[in-house]
Image (cartoon, rainbow, N blue to C red):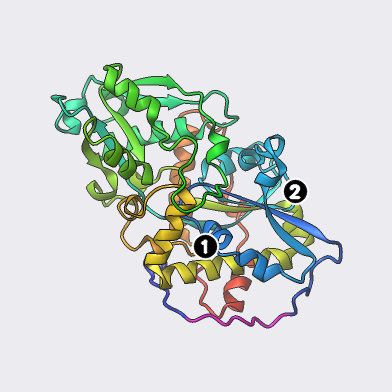
Amino acid sequence: MDANVWLNMPWGIKLDRNPPHSPTEGISIMATDIWYTRCPVPTASGIAFRRNMFDEEFDGSDFKVRNIKELGREKADSHFDHSLPNSYREGGSIPPLWAKHGGADTVMIGLTFVSDSICFYVRPDSDIRSFADLKGKRVAMGVRPYIMIDFMKINAHKAWDCGLRAHGMSLDDVELVELEINDDMHANINPDYKPGEKPPASNMFGVEMAALESGEVDAIWAKGCQTRQLEREESDKVRLISDLLHDTDNMELRVNANPRIITVSGNMARENPEAVVRYLQVLIRASSWAAANPDECSETMATELGVSVDDINGSFVANYQDKLWPNLADETLHLLATQQDFMVQHGYLPGPVDLQAWGDSSFLKQAYQRENLPWVA
C-alpha cells in the first residue's frame, strides 16, 4: 500500500473483536502494572483511556494498564526521559528522540502524523499584514528552563523556521526574542479532565500574548487547539497573518513535534512481546472507533484536551479522526527525520538517532493481523 494512501485512508473497516489468542497467552505469570503516558494532542491512547479500552483488553490478564500520573510528581519526568520500566508513551517526537539519543532503553513501535494548525499572530493595530512585513521584527520564542528537554522552545524555533521558509524567508530575517515561562507543564500531561473542565493553564501561550500586548514583541505563534482557543478568547487582541495548515502543501513545513511517536520500554518489548502486541491492538481499535465516529471523537478529544469542540474541529487537518492509525510507513519516518534534522542542526540533539534501528515493526504487524487489517511496510 502506498504511504500516501495510508496517511489519508478513511479505514471504515469492521474489526474482529475476538482475535485468535487466549487472554494470557505469552504473558508473564507475575502480575505487572503497565504504565502509559500521552501528550495533550489527538492520540489513540487518549481515546482508549477515555473509553476504558485498556481495561477491557487486559481484564482477567496478569497486566493492568495505569496512568503514570498515579505515581505522582517524582515519576512524572518519565514522560520526557522514558525512565520508567514497563511503560508506553504516545506523543510529541522531541522528548523520545532526545531520550533515545541519551541512552533510554526504548523501542519505537508506531508513528502517527496529524497536521495541526501552526499560526502566527500580530496585534490588530499592527502595520504587519504579511510575513514579508516581519523582516527585521521581533518574534516570540517561549523558553522553559525548568523542563529537562525544552520541547516548547524547539517547537517555537521550528515554527518560525518553517513559517518563514514557507513565505520565502529565513530565520535571519527576524529577531528571536526568548521569553522565560515558569508554568507547570506537568499539569497538562496525561490529562483526566471532566467534560467542560479546563486545564490549570488554559492557554499555553499566555506569556507570549502578554509580550505581544505590551509591545515587547511584534508577533507570536501558537499551535493545535490552542490557536482556535486563543482566537476565541482573545479575539480583540490578535490578528492572524498565517496558518501553515492552510498556507502550505509542503508536509515537511507542517512538522512541529510530529510525527507523534509510540514508544515502549525495552524491557517490555523483550520480556512481554505479547503484551506489546495487545496494547497496540487497543490503539488500532481506538483508531477504528475514531474514524467511524468522527463527531463523538471530537467530543472525546475536547474533553481530553480541556477545550471546546469548536476548538478541536478547527485546529487539525480535515478528517483528522481518520489519521490516528499507528504506522511505521517510510513517508512518516521521513517526516520524523526532518524533525530530527532540525534538532541536530540547531544543537538540540548532539547527533541523529538511527530511526530504522530504533523502530521495530513486528509488534504492529502482528496487531494489525489480529485485527484483520492490512499492514503497510
Q: Residue 202 falls in which quadrant of the image?
A: top left
**Any magenta on residue 221?**
no
The x, y position of residue 331, in whole percent, is: 43, 58
Measuring 15% from the left and 25% from the top, which residue is drawn there? 125
Residue 124 appears left or right of 23: left
Mark 1 element type: loop
In front here: 77 or 372?
Answer: 77
Q: Position of residue 359 (x, y in %)?
A: 60, 56
In the image: residue 303, left or right of residue 27 = left
Q: Amino acid at mark 2?
A: Pro
Query: Where are the magenta residues, as a range?
Result: 14-21
Position of residue 57 in the picture relative to residue 197 (left or right): right
Above or below residue 228? Residue 364 is below
Closest to the observer, 99 or 308: 308
- 87 sits left or right of 139 in the view: right
Determine crowd level at label 1: few under 14, some 14-19, many 20+ residues with C-alpha closer than 10 A. many
Q: Is residue 169 above or below residue 316?
A: above
- Place residue 159 in its image quadrant: top left
Residue at the image point whose x is 48% and y is 54% from the top? 333
Seen at 68% across and 35% down, the residue is: 73
Nearest to the observer: residue 255 or residue 238: 238
Residue with the mark numbered 2? 85
Q: Indicate which disc residue 326 carries.
A: 1
Principal SS element in the magenta part? loop
Residue type at mark 1?
A: Pro
Residue 167 in view of the camera = no
Give the CA separation, mark 1 to mark 2.
22 Å
Observer able to see residue 373: yes
